[in-house]
Amino acid sequence: MKVVILCGGYGTRIRDVSDNIPKPMIPVGRLPILWHVMKYYASFGHREFVLCLGYKGQVIKEFFLNYEAQTRDCTVTLGTNKSIDYHTNHEEADWRVTLSDTGLETMTGGRIRKIRQYIGDDAEFMLTYGDGVSNVDLNKLLAFHHSHDRIITVTGVRPPGRFGELVADEQGIVTEFNEKPQATGGRISGGFFVCRRELFDYLDDREDLVFEQEPMRSLVRAQQLAVYEHDDFWQCMDTYRDWQFLNGLIEKDRAPWKIW
């Protein structure tokens, strides 16, 4: 199944990490967070991607156009008989990545509408953001979507708390400390959507169409939006602190989304 990833935003709240690359290209560990998102989907067998590019989209294009050289050991012969000999392999040889320039100022709804041609005749596709990771079971998400027969299924998550959570015993001695616990209150959209192609009927041709506003509200009114509840790990990368947290999980080999 094709996976559409929204990669075009400005990422203004995380400019203190890097201002010369788009947010999806900010590295978590050695590779961009976008790569982590794609690698997670590929682990479930979804290896055909459509990337909706916008702000500094050329950086994302260059990453994939030069993917072999960036991910494999190689010997470069210079001069008239120049050549490149690769010595190692990577595990992404069967990925198919469509890089679509959906506009610098286009909002999320407009970006999705602009990639309709790349969905082809497919009855459904997956959709997510290029700046958030999770350990949601994509097989169970897809099965849930099919069982509810709605146009869209969204993954509903409990957002991580802003502050550390202390758990103490009756004597007031701390027994547990969680740096970023999942909230116990209401759910928010965590992305990781499954969509039927009828979604395009809810998207007009305005550049400023925000997917999460008018189209989603229309789907709610039509009772065509289902929610798959996910209570385990989910984390977006909106701020410098989020970036530090995700990198810390990678460094400690405790990243819940790293199943490959």
Image (cartoon, rainbow, N blue to C red):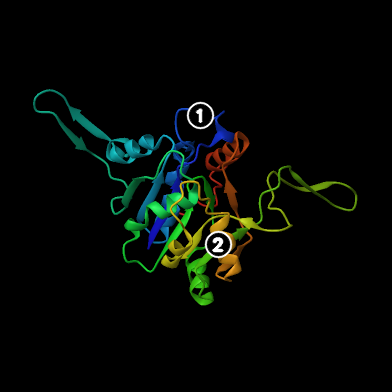
Q: In the image, residue 230 lies at what x, y percent?
A: 60, 62
Q: Residue at x 42, y 45 (%)?
A: 35
185 or 201: which is nearer to us? 201
Bin the neighbour count of mark 2 within 10 Å (Cα to Cα): few under 14, some 14-19, many 20 and up.
many
Reading the image, the residue beneath label 1 is 18
Q: Quadrant of residue 47?
A: bottom left
Question: Which residue appears farthest toward the right when viewing the image?
Answer: 171
**Which type of secondary structure does the marked residue at label 1 adopt?**
loop
Would you say residue 72 is visible in this rendering?
A: no
Q: Position of residue 182 (x, y in %)?
A: 68, 53
Question: Considering the numbered disc 2 on the image, is that residue within a helix, a strand or a loop?
Answer: strand
Left or right of residue 111: residue 133: right
Can residue 222 be seen here? The reply is yes
Numbered label attached to residue 254: none
The residue that mark 2 highlights is 154
Q: Quadrant of the N terminus?
A: bottom left
**Amino acid type indicated by mark 2:** Val
**Frontmost residue, 30 versus 9:** 9
- Residue drawn at the location 47% of the way across and 67% of the way down: 139
Q: Eyeballing the image, is 46 above or below 179?
A: below
Compared with 133, 146 (above or below) is: below
Q: Is 226 displayed left or right of 124 in the figure? A: right
